[in-house]
Image (cartoon, rainbow, N blue to C red):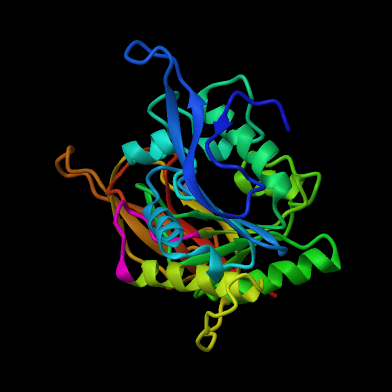
Amino acid sequence: MAETLITSEVDFEAEGKQSGYLRVPHSVDRSAYGWLPVPITILRNGAGPTLIVSAGVHGDEYEGQIAVAELANDLAVEDIIGRLILLPMVNAPAAAAGRRMSPVDDGNMNRLYPGDPKGTPSEMIAHFHEEVLLPRADYAVDLHSGGESLKYPATLLRGPGHTPEEEAGLEKLTEAFDLPYAWVFTSGGGRNSTARTAMGAANRKGVINVMAELGGGNVVTREVLALARRGLRRTLHALGMLPDYAPDAPRGTRLLHAKGSIYVYEPGLFEPLKDIGEAVSTGEVVAVIHHPETQGRQPDEVTSPYEGIVLAIRSLAQVRRGDAIFQIAADAG
Ligand SMILES: [Zn+2]
């Protein structure tokens, strides 16, 4: 077992269904011997693959937290073949606060892997995720969303396969999840990944893994949540882990490559002229930035340096220099 100060209330090797907490030691004024609780549920039923489904690496991304907690509540061990590890609130303090960053240590966990076993709580959790949990997994799904500041359509994210087996596994997960969009990375990944994300952690451990961006803007929509619920069950079924589930017909996924984000230079109020999924051309005006504090000042126009479609859009009207207002992607291939 890797060095860690985190203890687990559940036994990763035991058969059956267990729910409990990872205890992240946290000694503070109000609780000298206390720990921060990271909820975890494990279902294990005989031989089969191990899948980790995580959400709440960023605390203000809610659809995944709901869908993972629901699986933990709803599934009985007899429903499963193999081992399913469910983490609905990986960075639990951030999730409890509804924030991207943890209020305990300002940790943005998806920028902290591989973490530090003796670091801050966010670093300790990242380390535990990478060094204790992921080495046990064959597959991993990490659920995100646009959070407070962005909105995405339901979008799967996957890297390039570095071996025929990895490519086949990634295609299988993409088809199984069956979200409307997939953002396919053209580089990175693999065992030598240096990414400080949960995806980078899974890649370093040789785990076939995808992530998803599910909605955002601090709300939960019925449409996106339904796609997340369906996608997780379809994925379990496709891996042979939920044999009695009867998937409906696939709807198909539009495969995209990211082109880049469009940034603001003038602070003000962001008026979008494009919605998610709309086409943009190079040089086209896609937003105006208003300046109500200065009488007579005309709005600034923002043009797109890219051709493609809008994949993500900023959900907050106030903007400062350096804020991304759109992410643009284009059809893959
Ligand atoms: Zn996120």
Q: Quadrant of residue 96?
A: top left
Q: Position of residue 265 (x, y in %)?
A: 41, 41
**Left or right: 8, with 277 as reference point:** right
Above or below, 232 against 187 in this view is below
Residue 122: x and y, percent? 52, 30
Q: Quadrant of residue 228?
A: bottom left
Tell me the magenta residue range: 213-222
Which residue corresponds to the image point at 49% horizontal and 63% vertical from the top-left?
A: 283
Q: Residue at x 40, y 62 (%)?
A: 285
| Residue depicted at 70% across the width and 37% down the height | 131
| 82 in the magenta segment | no
Residue 307 appears in the figure? no
- The residue most toward the right is 163
Q: Is residue 37 above or below residue 19?
A: above
Q: Quadrant of residue 237?
A: bottom right
Image quadrant containing the N terminus: top right
Q: Looking at the image, is 187 positioned above or below residue 90?
A: below
Q: Is residue 244 left or right of residue 288?
A: right
Toward the viewer: 267 or 107? 107
Compare residues 305 and 252 and report the one nearer the observer.
Answer: 252
